[in-house]
Amino acid sequence: MKKTTKVLFLTAAFCLSVLNAYALNSAAYESSAHTIEDDAYAIMNVLDWKNLEFKNACAFSNLNSTSSGNIASVFHINGENVLGLSWEGNLWSETSYNSLTGFYGWDKFAVTLNLTEYMSPSWYMDSTICEDYKNIGGKSEFGYLINNMFDLKLALGVANTSGTINTADINYTDFLIGSTLYYKMKDDSAFKVKFFLDYEGAFASREATVGNNQTKTSYSQNVIKCGTKLLYKTDMFSYGLYGAIPITIISGDDISTDVNLDFILSNGFSVILNPDKLLFNAGAEISFPSITFHENEDTEKGIFFTTFYAGFSFILNKMIKLDISTGLNPNNGISFDDIWNQNFNISLSAKF
């Protein structure tokens, strides 16, 4: 149980602080099972920012039924250069969460700088309650469009967590480094195919103090991911595919070294029901049974997991688009209450 707890905590701490600090995912992108990239995907994106076409400014907002949302806007300055700013956080929860990101893109380069904070009087982590929880983190990304075939992204992040667990005062520091290389095999308006190789390293230092006694531990999580993205478009229909094989290596003090192999495949489509007015989007994200190799223990196999997505895009006018989406996981059956209490995402994008 100790091993599982440490692994879960290492992963959760990073996801909370710096890994997903400023993702701008529209409801349309979600409803295609994250396969058909739209304007919102390009906003604040250090590699895809040039795919966003607008005259003066572009704005985006995403609200969902889990008490969080975001707003972002980008502008042209100095000709074709792009300056952007985004905020993401909660709106009506006692737990404070705010993430602020700045963006600047010029020529073949782009850079982002993000600051994120979580604060709560009590927070569930490491299988227990952390009192006076504080998490402050930052992340920077740099993108370089090398040529017509290759794109490169680099990332660097750091986060600090403090609070009290039982009688121990904790002080956790996490570091993140990452890089992604894309190879574009085909890149035109009707058909796009690209392959990617991604690395993400998370390194954690843990300190716990009880009175005059202090314990220190360290952990690491290294993820290597290879995969492909495909997008096919016609005048009335779009199809997207995403496939990836992440290999995760987790090690550290007082835990065994684990190697986890995952298989992910997503398919999505978007069809125009009424030109310039209404689109229907749907998709499925499939996680095939994972394989985990434990040090000095038996190999563990995961389960087959599928999530279905669906939604609509309403084109209100030439400048404004409204998207609605939801996701459903039928692996354990579906009840009427599940459908009635289904969460929905609503996003709004505008060009000026």
Image (spheres, rainbow, N blue to C red):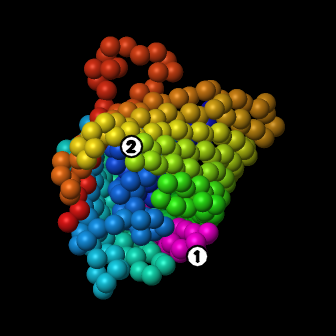
Q: Position of residue 150 (x, y in %)?
A: 61, 69
Mark in front: 1 vs 2: 2
Expressed as whole percent of the image width and height from the top left, the position of residue 68 reads 27, 46
Asked which secondary structure carries label 1, the reply is: loop
Q: Kindly indicate the quadrant of the structure image that contains residue 78.
A: bottom left
Q: Is residue 146 above or below residue 8?
A: below
To which quarter of the image does residue 131 belong?
top left
Q: Residue at x 65, y 39 (%)?
A: 263
Q: State whether residue 85 appears in this view.
A: no
Which contiguous range is marked in magenta? 136-155
Q: Is residue 137 magenta?
A: yes
Classify 10 Å Cα crowding around label 2: few (below 14), some (14-19), many (20 and above): few
Say whether residue 196 is left or right of residue 51: right
Q: Which residue is mark 2?
A: 236
Q: Is residue 255 left or right of residue 16?
A: right
Asked whether residue 151 is in view, the answer is yes
Between residue 301 and residue 335, name the one nearer to us: 335
Which quadrant is home to the N terminus? Answer: top right
Mark 1 lies on residue: 146
Label 1 vs 2, first from the N-terminus: 1
